[in-house]
Each structure stands twice: as structure tokens, then as C-alpha cells.
Amino acid sequence: MKKQLSIFIFLIFITSSNLYAQLDKNGNPIFNSEKIENINFEGFEIVSSYYTIKDNVDNKQSSVFINENPNLDDYWNFSTKLPSYYFMVVDKGNIKGMLILIPKEEDHSFFYNVVIPNKRENFQIPSKLKGNITENRAKELADIKKTKAIINNDVLKFNNKDFQFIKYNDVIEEVKNIAKEKIIVNHKDENSNIEEYIKAESKGGRFDFKNTVEKYDGSLINFDGVMYNKKDFAILMWGAAVKKAGITELNKAKLLWQEINERSLTEPELKALQKGFETKF
């Protein structure tokens, strides 16, 4: 399935001065890609995608357009000077980190540009892999008839020369290591910090809604067609607030509330908590 990557793609422009500034309707550069696979890893999902030669090198609507009728040099320059892969580390639909594998033509090495959106962090990590080209690029070149490229024993034969390519599975292993050390660990620490903050603020602080509900007249509060007593409605508000703060699992919120209050939720209280999770104030 083809799609356009627009988030943080501007980061790759540091690698080449010959890119064309084709933009989408939102003003973002266009670099067409296709998804390779989804990988379950450490409770997260790594979404792997590939920037294709097709729909880019000869596409005037692409930011990396080179020529409508590319020659061998055009194909080679595109394949070896521009990124091949990008990866998203996702937790329950939320992007926690992104990696783009970028080539360094001068020494046949690669590096990862890593972005952690919620921390506004952007840094680079060298790859230990060496090669002239990535496996997916080599295979796509070999599929383009006019290049007359072939692959034999993990060697790309292109334009009467032999080139080593880095294997996709080796890239995946590096991505997993980086994701675990730089993204997943930070996310787990972040979740731990959020829980400690909620615990501290749930009695007399930001997440204590007892005084808030006492301002309502009467003993019951009508919300979305359901009557709640003030105690239960305070739990409803607490549920909505902790979800907004980053606790995205109802069961985790339930256990956290019970730890804070040193007792189990009653059935009406649990229903109120669930309603809070479904509500955006």
C-alpha cells in the first residue's frame, strides 16, 4: 500500500542538496513509501516502511524527483544517496519514536536519525552495518528491466560492477536494539513518573475532585443521562483526568485508584471510572 510520509521528513534534506521541493497540500515534502511489515516487540509495535524508487525518481509530484526518464546514474544516485527505510515505534496507536536509516556515501556506512516526538528530541546513531546499498533498494533495482541489474549470492551486479548490500533483517535487529535502549525504556520510565505524579496529586492536589463536586447543588449529579452521587462523580472526573495524563488502560487506572485509596472499587464506582475513561472534558 503506497502512502506519503510527511512527519519529520524534512530531517533527511541535510543528506542531499539536489532534492526538489514538491510539497503536499499541507506544505510537507512528499516521499512516497510502502509498508513492509508490523513487528511486535517488547509490548510495542515497530512499523517498518520502505521508500520506493518507483513513484519517486520519475514522479514530478515527489520531493525527490530526478528525471522522467531516469538513466543508470539517476537510479544509482537515488538508490544510494537517499534513505531506504523508516520505522515507527508505536504503543496502542501512539507514535513513541521514529527512525530513518540514512546512507553516508563517502564510506559506505549508514546512520539512524531518531526522533522522539513527545520529548522533542532528535539525535543520530551510527549503524554498524556496511554496504553500498540496502537489500530492498538492490532488489527493486533488479526488478527494473532497463537497469539490467541482477542479484547473485547477496551481491548486486549493476552497471558492470559488484556491490555489497546490507540485509533487511540485520537492519531490523539494529532497530530493535535502538528502540529498546532509546525509546521503550524512556516510555516505561515516563509511565512510572506519571503514576507517581498521579499518586501525589490524588489527595489534595490536581487529581482530587472532592471539592470540585461539592460545588454542585443537590446530592446527585446528572451526567449524560445517568445520575451519580458526588463520590462516584469525583471518580468519573478522576478517570477522565488520568487518561488525559497518559494512563491509557482502564485496568491500570483501576489498580492505581485502589492503590491510592487502599480499597477496591465498588461496582457503581467502577462504572463511573469507566465512564470517565470514555469522556473528554
Image (cartoon, rainbow, N blue to C red):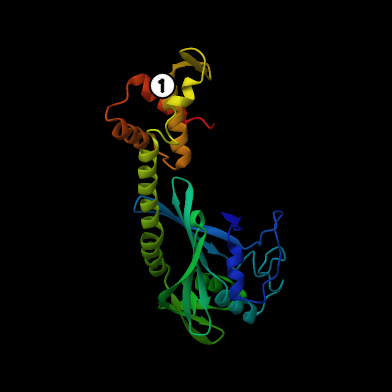
* Residue 203: x %, y % from top left: 37, 33
From the viewer's side, name the closer residue of 228 and 98: 228
How many labels were placed on the picture?
A: 1
Q: Nearer the viewer, residue 54 or 25?
A: 25
Q: Amino acid at mark 1?
A: Asp
Residue 232 or 187: which is nearer the viewer?
A: 232
Q: Is residue 73 left or right of residue 263?
A: right
Q: Is residue 211 above or below residue 107?
A: above
In which quadrant is the N terminus drawn? bottom right
Residue at image location 71% in from the left, 67% down from the top = 21
Residue under the point 39% across and 51% down: 190
Name the residue rendered at 35%, 37% in the picture: 252
Percent coordinates x, y for residue 117 in the rendering: 51, 56
Q: Is residue 278 above or below residue 142?
A: above
- Element on which disc 1 rests: helix
Question: Is the residue marked by circle 1 packed among few (<14), some (14-19), or many (20+) residues within 10 Å?
Answer: many
Spot the residue most to the top: 218
Instruction: Name the residue: 45% across, 77% down.
Output: 165
Q: Is residue 63 left or right of residue 277?
A: right
Residue 71 in picture, x, y percent from top left: 66, 79
Give the quadrant of the C terminus: top right
Location of residue 132 in the rendering, given as x and y in whole percent from the top left corner:
49, 80
Q: In the drawing, does residue 103 fall left or right of residue 28?
A: left
Q: Which residue is mark 1?
A: 232
Residue 165, compared with residue 197, is above or below; it is below
